[in-house]
Image: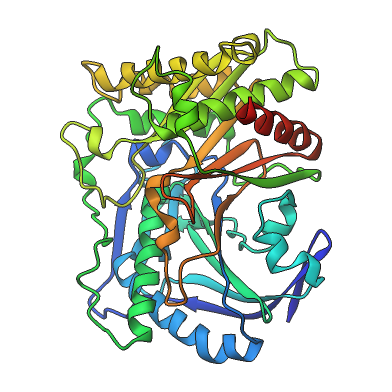
């Protein structure tokens, strides 16, 4: 057994498995070429998320009763989601004849780690699944690392071969357990990964009660890459830009030692909508939530000494599946997310009209995208120019969506007690509330000093 120290916590590895889909003797190699939507994420870190299940059991019960059906149902889920067993194949030179792709070969597998929390009880299940500030290293002990890629020779080319998914089940003896995922964003966006997890959970729940009809699942993926049109050759341009800027594909994340993650619950969002209804009558829950977070972050940074003329960037993803021309299936597997950039100066966000300014800026950006004669892909060619321009400026990235409905992810033990993305940078994850229809849960990662200030500003703003 191995111990992984994380802050004051320790996680002990009990078992490690490699899980593959059912063997198909006729299968050789399957390739899914990367589209420009996938290329956008090549040099960025993978994303991690964790589900907590309030299901007290012993170590022996976990290993003997829960893990075997989890492995079997994972095998069956990977039959449909085979790319998640595969590897990213990324050429190391621009002159390569190899197309960047996800490659699935016979006997490819997903890493499944079974672990046990062995730290102090006070820092265990209730602590880590709570809403209060928790050390990000404590949360990252519950999600597996995605191995770095290795260089491999393919014909006359040199390529980087990288796994795309790892899974970790961590038991908190007699309290519950968590299931953590680390996924390369290049392989799948949040919607695709959420569909996979729901498929796995549904198969496991059916298996526990003896039901074996899995073909009726509504989350099965669509793989045809031909539905993504690229007449301007954006994919090749994206690969060239990232290759020239990075020199190598890297998943390294910043080492932030003093960072914590908190969850903010907002059950009643209509009050925020009422603040802008006179000027902007039709706004979504997602929009007002992001705008409020953005203004609170600007006020936090002002309170901690940031200049008011500094630009503040808000980044969030827009699922473009239904907005492409023609629209593509909702169950398309891969990435179809457009990163939406919104920029205002601190002084525009912290004043009396700051919240309204934030909503208007977001709506203006989305309206320009949605109503453009060129469609939602207008301006995508300058995506990396925007990143470069904002490199040293303050940003807040928003991940997730209430539409993923992650609290319906029932493996047969009931819905999760808690679900959240896990970050090591300025970011927040939005999800629907577990206990309140229409409510939101907002997981936010900041330094301890910033979190203390932000929490006060966030709460006071809602009271006022």
| Labels in figure, total | 0
Residue at 38% across / 31% down in the picture?
Answer: 284
The spot of residue 131 in percent (x, y) is 66, 52
Q: Nearer the viewer, residue 225 or 136?
A: 136
Q: Is residue 312 above or below residue 324?
A: above
Q: Quadrant of the N terminus?
A: bottom right
| Residue furthest to the left | 326
Visual colour scheme: rainbow
* Quadrant in which the C terminus appears: top right
Residue 355 coordinates in the image, percent (x, y): 54, 18
Residue 23 lies, in percent from the top left, at 32, 80
**Residue at image coords 24%, 62%:** 218
Q: Residue at x 39, y 78 (%)?
A: 204
- The image quadrant that residue 347 belongs to is top right
Q: Position of residue 233 (x, y in %)?
A: 29, 28
In front of the other: 269 or 322: 269
Residue at x 79%, y 40% (from the top left corner): 448
Determine the image quadrant of residue 393: top right
Q: Is residue 462 above or below residue 146?
A: above
Asked whether residue 242 is in view, the answer is yes
Query: Considering only vertical position in the picture, is 312 above or below 69?
Result: above
Q: Is residue 391 visible?
A: no
380 to 433, vertically: above or below: above
Judged left or right of residue 91, residue 446 is right
Residue 297 left/right relative to 118: left
């Amino acid at each position: 057994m191995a111990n992984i120290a994380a802050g004051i916590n320790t996680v002990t590895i009990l078992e490690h498995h490699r899980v593959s889909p059912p063997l198909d003797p006729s299968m050789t190699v399957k390739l899914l070429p990367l589209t420009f939507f996938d290329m956008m994420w090549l040099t960025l870190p993978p994303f991690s998320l964790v589900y907590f299940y309030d299901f007290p059991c012993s170590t022996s019960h976990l290993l003997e009763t829960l893990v075997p059906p989890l492995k079997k149902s994972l095998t069956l889920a990977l039959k449909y989601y085979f790319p998640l067993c595969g590897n990213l194949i990324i050429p190391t030179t621009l002159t390569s004849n190899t197309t960047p792709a996800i490659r699935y070969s016979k006997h490819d597998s997903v890493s499944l780690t079974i672990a046990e929390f062995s730290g102090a009880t006070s820092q265990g299940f209730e602590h880590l699944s709570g809403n209060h500030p928790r050390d990000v290293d404590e949360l990252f002990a519950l999600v597996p690392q995605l191995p770095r890629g290795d260089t491999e020779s393919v014909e006359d080319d040199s390529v980087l071969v990288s796994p795309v998914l790892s899974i970790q089940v961590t038991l908190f003896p007699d309290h519950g357990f968590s299931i953590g995922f680390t996924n390369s964003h290049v392989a799948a966006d949040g919607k695709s990964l959420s569909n996979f997890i729901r498929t796995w959970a549904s198969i496991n729940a059916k298996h526990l009660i003896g039901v074996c009809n899995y073909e009726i699942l509504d989350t099965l993926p669509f793989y045809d890459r031909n539905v993504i049109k690229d007449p301007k050759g954006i994919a090749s341009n994206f690969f060239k830009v990232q290759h020239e800027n990075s020199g190598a594909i890297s998943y390294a994340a910043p080492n932030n030692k003093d960072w914590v993650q908190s969850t903010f619950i907002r059950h009643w969002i209509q009050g925020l909508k009422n603040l802008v209804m006179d000027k902007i009558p039709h706004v979504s829950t997602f929009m007002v939530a992001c705008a409020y977070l953005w203004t609170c972050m600007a006020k936090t940074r002002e309170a901690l000494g940031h200049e008011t003329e500094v630009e503040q960037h808000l980044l969030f993803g827009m699922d473009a599946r239904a907005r492409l021309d023609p629209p593509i299936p909702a169950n398309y597997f891969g990435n179809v997310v457009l990163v939406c950039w919104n920029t205002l100066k601190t002084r525009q966000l912290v004043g009396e009209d700051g919240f309204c300014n934030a909503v208007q800026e977001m709506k203006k950006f989305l309206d320009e995208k949605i109503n453009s004669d060129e469609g939602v892909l207008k301006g995508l060619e300058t995506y990396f120019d925007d990143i470069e321009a904002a490199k040293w400026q303050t940003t807040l990235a928003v991940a997730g969506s209430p539409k993923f409905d992650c609290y319906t992810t029932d493996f047969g033990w009931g819905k999760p007690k808690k679900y959240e993305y896990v970050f090591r940078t300025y970011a927040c994850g939005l999800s629907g509330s577990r206990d309140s229809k229409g409510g939101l849960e907002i997981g936010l990662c900041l330094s301890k000093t910033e979190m203390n200030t932000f929490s006060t500003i966030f709460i006071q703003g809602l009271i006022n």
